[in-house]
Image (cartoon, rainbow, N blue to C red):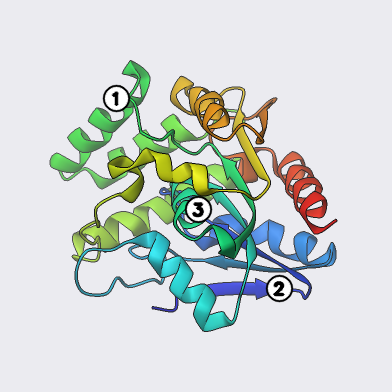
Amino acid sequence: MKLPYSERGDGSEVLLLHAGIADRRMWAEHLDPLAAAGHRVRAVDLPGFGQAVPGHGPVAHWEDVLETMDALGIAQTSLVGNSFGGAVALRVAALHPQRVSALLLFSAPAVPEPDPSPELLAVWDAEEEALAADDLEKAVEVVVSSWVRPEASAEVRERIATMQRENYGLRASGQQPEQAADPLEEDPSLVAAIGCPVLLAAGESDMVDFKNAVRELGATLPGARTTLIPGCGHLAPLEAPEEFRRLVLEHVSREDS
């Protein structure tokens, strides 16, 4: 499978993997600045999101990313993921460490995933309750209010609402695929195969699950750099775009040197 993608620039490779309440459009304002800094930057839609129609059978997003890299002739890349995209990036790096030159995870879940906090469980329950009642707009409202900080701009809030509304549409049309077995849940020790530079970040105002994940993944990857981003929640690329880019460029330039 070759995933749909947007592309800018020329230079060392950077691949962006979106959050599970978004699609590749969440990276729109980052493509040109990252390209201008000397990188070939690509953002993909993962299967079941945006324009990526899933194939037949269970979907292993990490393998779809690898197949896309092969199709695009990318031997090795810096891999940047937010939330669900961070979980996918972690699995690409653990299963195919030679293909990842740097790994940057923003608000990625821990491995193995612990029981959700009461706050996170309440969000999931509220979303499922709205969907069970066929109240799509209520579900969108739950997602936006839960995952986007109140201080975020109206444009950011509306962009997430639009992407998530379309994600629900894909689910309703049967384009939300069955998920393949998670190799890191089956064998968390695979994470130890990651030898590239790693950045683990979350927002200071993110849910405790993801702030704890920075610490927990950092203990598994002792060479990783860890940070909490001030004035930011779960979606650093959208809520703190300048700091997000600074961290990406600083970390990728360290790998390039």
**Residue at disc 1, secondary structure:** helix
| Quarter occupied by the N terminus | bottom left
Q: Earlier in the sequence, mark 1 or mark 3?
A: 3
Q: Earlier in the sequence, mark 3 or mark 2?
A: 2
Estimate how packed mark 2 is, as few (under 14), some (14 to 19) or many (20 or more) residues with alpha carbons within 10 Å: some
Residue at position x 25%, y 60% from top? 176
Q: Residue lying at the far left in this picture: please name it.
A: 132
How many numbered discs sit on the rendered protein? 3
User: Residues under labels 1 and 3: Cα distance?
Assistant: 24 Å
**Residue at disc 2, secondary structure:** strand
From the image, tell me which residue sits under label 2: 8
Which of 141/256 is in front? 256
Residue at position x 52%, y 51% from top? 159
Q: Amino acid at mark 1?
A: Leu
Checking the image for residue 89, the label placed there is: 3
User: Residues under labels 3 and 2: Cα distance?
Assistant: 20 Å
Residue at position x 58%, y 40% from top? 106
Q: Is residue 182 among the parts visible in the rendering?
A: yes
Residue 13, position in %: x, y? 69, 68
| Quarter occupied by the C terminus | bottom right
Estimate how packed mark 1 is, as few (under 14), some (14 to 19) or many (20 or more) residues with alpha carbons within 10 Å: few
Which of 84/95 is in front? 95
Residue 234, position in %: x, y? 53, 34
30 left or right of 192 in image: right
Toward which corner of the image does residue 219 lie, by quadrant? top right
20 left or right of 169 in image: right
From the image, tell me which residue sits under label 1: 121
Q: Amino acid at mark 2?
A: Arg
Residue at position x 40%, y 35% from top? 111
Mark nearer the viewer, 1 or 3: 3
Mark nearer the viewer, 3 or 2: 3
